[in-house]
Amino acid sequence: MNEQIFWIILKRLRVPFLVILVTFSISILGLILIPGLDDTGKVYHMTFFDAFYFVSYMASTIGFGEAPYTFTYPQRMWVSAMIYITVIGWFYGIGTIVAIVQDDALKKAINRNKFAKQVAGLGKKFFIILGYNSVTKSIINRINNDDYRVVVLDRDESKVDELILEDFYPHVPVYVGEATKQQMLKMAGIHHKNCAGVISLFGNDTKNTQIATICKLLNKKVKVIVKASSKQHLEHFKSMDLKHIQNPFDIISKRIFYSITAPHIWLLEMWMYGHSLKLRKRDMFPRGKYIICGYGRMGHAIEYGLKKANIEYELYTIDSKEYSKVKKTTIFGDNEDKQKLLDLGVEDAVCIIAATKDDLLNLTILNKAKSLNKNIFTVARENSLEDLNIFQAAKINKIYILEQILADSTYNHLSKPLAEIFIKEVRKKDEDWAKVMVGMLNNMTGLNPSYFETIIDEEHMYALSLELEKGTHVSLAKLRRSRENRAEILHIVYLILKRDGEIYLMPDNHTQLKIGDELLIVANDENREDFEYITNNIYELKYILDIDNSNVFLDT
Amino acid sequence: MNMHKIVSGFFFIFAMTINFGFFYGDPTIIVEHSAFELFAAIVINLVATVLKLGDKTQLGAVLLATSLVADIQLVASATIWALAEYVFGGLNPESTTAIVSLAGGALLANIVSVILFISDTAKSKR
């Protein structure tokens, strides 16, 4: 298709070229044939070079004057006729050529070629992200680094321009194209050997379904990460054997359930998403009567979570669209609304959740509720990230930002697979276990520990993998030694060990390590550095492992 | 019969014949080679090249390539003539031979082009 455009463009150049060629040659020929007079009055014939020189600057309207000698009248007559022919021909020809070169179709073809070349040249694993918006932008910001690259398709040209202005590094190839077209997906590299997955987080479930189906048909091996917000689509994806379904409402439902019934499990989960590992009072959902305003997808999800947690609740079905239609405003709080809140029992409720699709409506509902009941715990749904500042200023206890949740969970899924496994495993445990766990982590690694994922191979743990290849037995406990003094332990905690698809939560300290084991480790930055030093440096590792005959060193 | 075929065939063959007309003669004697003929050869060759633009078949691409070779050789020949005349103080046997032999090269390219064109025509059933 690209080639075709190129040929069509060339074909369109024929006429302008011919026009220039013919007008030039006629006027050159005329100038040579018409006799002139030189400065001594002798008859003079212009040479081909003289004529070519003169016509070149005449036609392009540069006009240096008559050369090499002043023209005679017959010459001037010929030239005045030729000026009109050649100049018009020149402008027509050059104008057409410039127009053709700037042709949209040609530009598109060139952009397309460039995009295809950039995709083909990606040497790292990459994800194809369909649609560019604040969610995918935040994902790109986090995964577009040394490990992964990103390719973006969006059908909206202004979005593409926005991405280009963002100037991501490493460069993100982007192209204007409809994501549901298989040709576009092919061009974006779905068949490329480095294509790790396709991310489709459109608001429209049907579109996501369509894309997921096409992707699975085009390349079975590719991971498809897709958003589903309704039950039937969820079922459909499951039947398609898609394992990576992002449903923000489901996440919210689970979070509410856990934060009421098992706050420490909730805390561990939130910690995996960057929350600090400390349960603050203001994070705790109170027990008592809840009011849910808005009974859409989010309202349903919250209801489900509350029901599971055995919490009493009142439903207020308020639809943002209908509300603004009837009241001609999205500011909640006239007398009728106030009465409605009082009827729902706002005065003795402990928590109110505003879950409509309209950010302003949510804000005003909570404000009104707060004025009626000072101590009420307020929870808001925030639909777009742009309103974040207003929400923060409104002192709302808890804000669920759908876009943020979606971006976070997708990011964790892509680049912290063990963290995701950890969350799943933790949910199987009970609150007591989680409480002990949090206490232990706080004791071992401080109040705000971070975690990292690593794998035992030559790239990540050079010294250790050499040692393991030799057949040395290294257990988890043996590695957990300070490199300053091996008699002391290093303050790290092994959370997850993954081996051949088997998951070990809190692996036994005597577990012998093998090459290929994946580990999720909790540590602060300093201890993490130490751990990496030990596993990568042969001498450090030797020092740590030789603890049994330690006196050799201590004597000196 | 197809008007475009007639026109392009005319120019392809004309380019070759006029090129031959300039090339024919003693390569060391410039008066046997007319400057007008070289001018005509250049113009006709350029026209032939333009007519070959935009043909996306395999044959079209080869034809365009041969035509570009002929153009470059003829323009080089004219450039040497102008240089010898105005910059190096007149033609000598060396520059004359260069002018004519460059045109000879262009003639070869033109012959190839015409052979390709004719063989393609002969191949077609109608």
Image: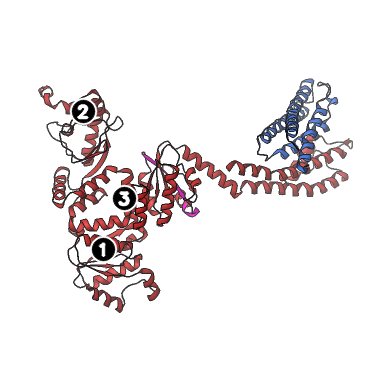
**Residue A205 in the image: above or below residue A375:** above
Please name the color used to draw chain A: red
Viewer-proximal residue, A65 or A490? Answer: A490
| Residues at discs 3 and 2 in contact (Cβ within 8 Å) | no
In this rendering, the label closer to the viewer, 2 or 1 = 1
Q: CA distance from mark 3 to mark 2?
A: 36 Å
**Residue A86 in the image: above or below residue A395:** above
Looking at the rendered image, the quarter that the C terminus of chain A falls into is top left
What is the chain letter for disc 1?
A
The residue labelled by disc 2 is: A541
The residue labelled by disc 1 is: A303
Magenta segment: A146-159
| Residue drawn at 38 percent across, 75 percent down | A326
What is the chain letter for disc 3?
A
**Mark 1 residue element:** helix
Q: CA distance from mark 1 to mark 3?
A: 22 Å
* The furthest residue to the right: A42
Residue A150 shown in magenta: yes
Mark 2, Cα crowd under 10 Å, few <14 / some 14-19 / many 20+, is many
Q: Which chain is painted in blue? A: B
| Residue drawn at 32 percent across, 43 percent down | A415
Q: Earlier in the sequence, mark 2 or mark 1?
A: 1
Asked if badge 2 and badge 1 are on a common chain, one would say yes
**Mark 3 residue element:** helix
Q: Position of residue A197 (x, y in %)?
A: 39, 43
The amino acid pointed to by label 3 is: Ser
Using residue A173 as the reference point, say whether residue A55 is left or right of it.
Answer: right
